[in-house]
Amino acid sequence: MAITKATNAGFASNKYNNVSADNYYMEPIAKTLVGSGGTSTITFSNIPQNYKHLQLRTLSKSDYSALAGDDTNNMYFNSDTTYTNYRTHRLNGNGSSATSNTVQSSGVQILAAGQSTRSYTGYTSMFGCGVIDILDYTNTNKYKTVRMLAGSDMNGAGDIAFHSSLWMNTAPITNIVINNSVGNFTQYSRFALYGIRG
Amino acid sequence: MAKTATYSLIASYTIPSAAASYTFSSIPATYTDLVLVSSPKVSTNQEAVQVRFNSDTASNYSFTQFGGDGSATFSYRASNVTSIYLSNGTSASNFGTGIFHIFDYSNTTTFKTVLGRFSEAAYVAWADVGLWRSTSAINSITLNVSGTSKTLSAGSTFKLYGIEDAK
């Protein structure tokens, strides 16, 4: 039997919500498509507070060309750049081994928003990507939880990452800022924000 | 104007009997990303379901993956290969699962980047990021099983969703 309804109100309740991926529960909020001049920072401001969760979908490239590789994009909420307010646990795969670590250090990217392929020789037209879920972002009783799956493949190089992150602040998220640690985002990089109703 | 769904089902298919492959064709170019949700079973236990775009069987694909099999973690890379792995199937009673994102699939300037997470409960959980080195817009997706004479089993399901642009 197909699962078509779900409830958190108990079996005696008649309050069921339809369960379907093909519906109006996901709505577009805003998108930034980087133009020919590139940009250093992506900002989503005045984020509407009428959704349950947010999903950020990224496809990005940096203009850094000196060395091969890719980099995870930095992300901050509500202009909070204090590193002790964030923590991340990571699982990474580089094509030969899987490793895990936790991060909370000054000057080190903590909260991530996708990966960017660098503009190294031979990397033309290659972009990194990410799907970032920001859960219960308006709740004033909880710290904010973020889940990210992201990666970059450059046909012989690249890596994939799974992050679980925390912003230790109960304020609702109204502003998201994203930048890259080694360069600017190049043309055709795309950052799209969606709201998930619940 | 009637409201349209942001996350829409484009096509859905359930394999009726053992099949060498299945193709989603004539994919509309009206979305920004695609999401392929799979629940496969295959003729040979734990073989991978693989994906190709626009009938391209040349060595224009690559991927980097990582995962765990219940006792150890692994990471693997394949370069200049003829497909990207989508999900593991199983020939036992349980089906594999997979969610596979295809970013900016109709863009004619960039190569195509894909990102997926998959599992087969009795075998492995893993994720991969892949690249199709073509700037062509994706208009078809072909699924088959790695290895000679391997097939998709009856009951395998594949659903293709489109995500509208967040203008």
Image (cartoon, rainbow, N blue to C red):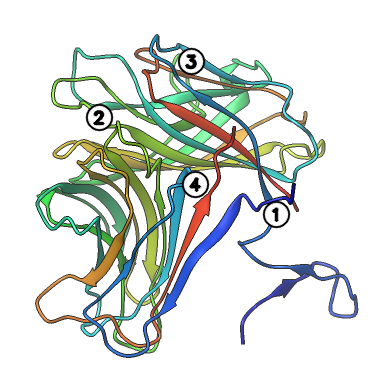
Q: CA distance from mark 3 to mark 1?
A: 41 Å
Q: Amino acid at mark 1?
A: Tyr
Q: Residue at x 9, y 77 (%)?
A: B148
To which quarter of the image does residue B22 belong? bottom left
Q: Secondary structure at mark 2?
A: loop
Residue under disc 2 on the same chain as residue under disc 3: yes
Using the image as rendered, state which of residue B24 and residue A40 is in the foreground.
Answer: B24
The residue under label 2 is: A125
Q: CA distance from mark 4 to mark 3?
A: 40 Å
Q: Which circle, 4 or 2, is nearer the viewer?
A: 4
Q: Amino acid at mark 4?
A: Tyr
The residue under label 3 is: A106
The residue under label 4 is: B31
Using the image as rendered, state which of residue B134 and residue A68 is in the foreground.
Answer: B134
Q: Please indicate whether residue A16 sits to the left or right of residue B12 in the image.
A: right
Q: Residue at x 68, y 44 (%)?
A: A53
Q: Secondary structure at mark 4?
A: loop
Which is more N-terminal, label 1 or label 3?
1
